[in-house]
Amino acid sequence: MAINLDKPTRWKADIAKSVDMYNDWFMKFAPNAFRTTRIQTTKDVEAALHSTENMTNIQPVIMQQHPEILPTLRMSTCPPLAVDRLIGLAGISPNLVKSIELKAKLPPRMKSNDIDRELAKIATIIEKMADPDIFIWLGRKEPPTEAEIHRAATIVADRLCGAVANPIIRNAQEKRQLAAIKAWLEARGYKQLTGGDGTRFDAMPAGTFSFRMNVPVKLEGGVQGVNIPIDAVIMPKKAKKKGFPIFFEAKSAGDFTNTNKRRKEEAVKKAQLRSTYRKKVQFNLFLCGYFESGYLGYEAAEGIDWVWEHRIDDLALFGI
């Protein structure tokens, strides 16, 4: 039975209420989420400054031991350097930089001599372009004071956090959404399974749920298999033996443009699940924020239903 996908006359009112709910949360809690991340990032930047002798001695060996400092170094220049800009300026391997940026690791198959040479090029660029307005002690004889170091670290941390502001907010919102689902389920007698108990998604006892659970699917051709994470996996209390759980993806958005860019993600995930488990799959969305009619129409056309967070009691209509 369709819950919301077949009721377009309600979409406009629900969109307005969802936008209001998201904006209310954002004004109250997003600054705190950003500030908490910035505090930790400032500490990480201070550690990076210490390892480079406050940007006066950037050695390849430091980046070998602590490759995670590269984003900090990129944000320490004037102007700050995007990944591709650093690659172009230094004339270095994209594989090296992207491995460090994405995995905080050096490429395992790259020869050590090549790594040393490439990291030395990075160090040269960073030292040449280090921002003198941030690191005001560069070029003077007196060492930096603790206050100057902390101030510089805060500025660089702001740059780092600004570059990833949307993921920070999205992660905080997702945690809140899952907490709302958890509270709703537990109030109705459901029990949460821990991620490490080894229970497969299709062997969950009736009346249980789990978050961020891996579900194996077969890719096109049916040969190669991968695990795809599902935000919320719920086995209804009335599920029969060998029953199939209900899947929900928690989705939030702070603007209408971003949702249109991401709307195919859910359709792809459902297609992968359906190709592996056929009609047993119930794949739905848990929405809060800016999801306009175009997005909803696209998901409805793909057979994907949803629950609005401001009407969380609609979860019961799925037989939960």
Image (cartoon, grey):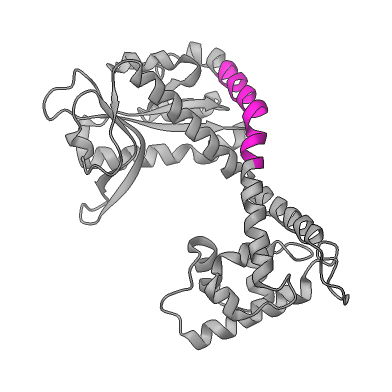
Residue drawn at x 56%, y 15% as measured from the top left: 12
Relative vertical location of residue 108 with respect to residue 273 in this rendering, above or below: below
The one of 56 and 177 positioned closer to us in this rendering: 56
Q: Toward the viewer: 91 or 185? A: 185
The image quadrant where one finds the C terminus is top left
Asked if the stretch drawn in magenta spans residue 27, the answer is yes
Pinpoint residue 65: horizontal percent, then vertical percent.
53, 74
- Name the residue at 30% across, 38% down: 194
Q: Residue 243, position in %: x, y?
A: 16, 28
User: In which quarter of the view is residue 64 placed?
Assistant: bottom right
Pick whichever, 225 or 68, lies toward us: 68
Of the 4 image quadrants, the one containing the N terminus is top left
Rendered location of residue 10, percent (x, y): 49, 12
Q: What residue is at 52 percent from the left and 40 percent from the top?
A: 171
Q: Residue 246: x percent and y percent?
A: 28, 28
- Vertical placement of residue 239 versus 153, above or below: above
On screen, residue 268 versus residue 55, left or right, reads left
Q: Nearer the viewer, residue 22 or 58?
A: 58
Q: Which residue is at the far bottom?
A: 113
Q: In the figure, is residue 4 to the left or right of 14?
A: left
Assess whether residue 16 is covered by the magenta stretch.
yes
Horizontal side, residue 303 vs residue 80: left or right: left
Q: Main secondary structure of the magenta part?
A: helix
Q: Residue at x 74, y 53 (%)?
A: 154
**In the orientation shown, which residue stands out farthest toward the left?**
241
Quadrant position of residue 146? bottom right
Q: Which residues are magenta?
A: 15-35
The relative height of residue 1 versus residue 143 in the rendered view (above or below) is: above
The total number of labels drawn is: 0
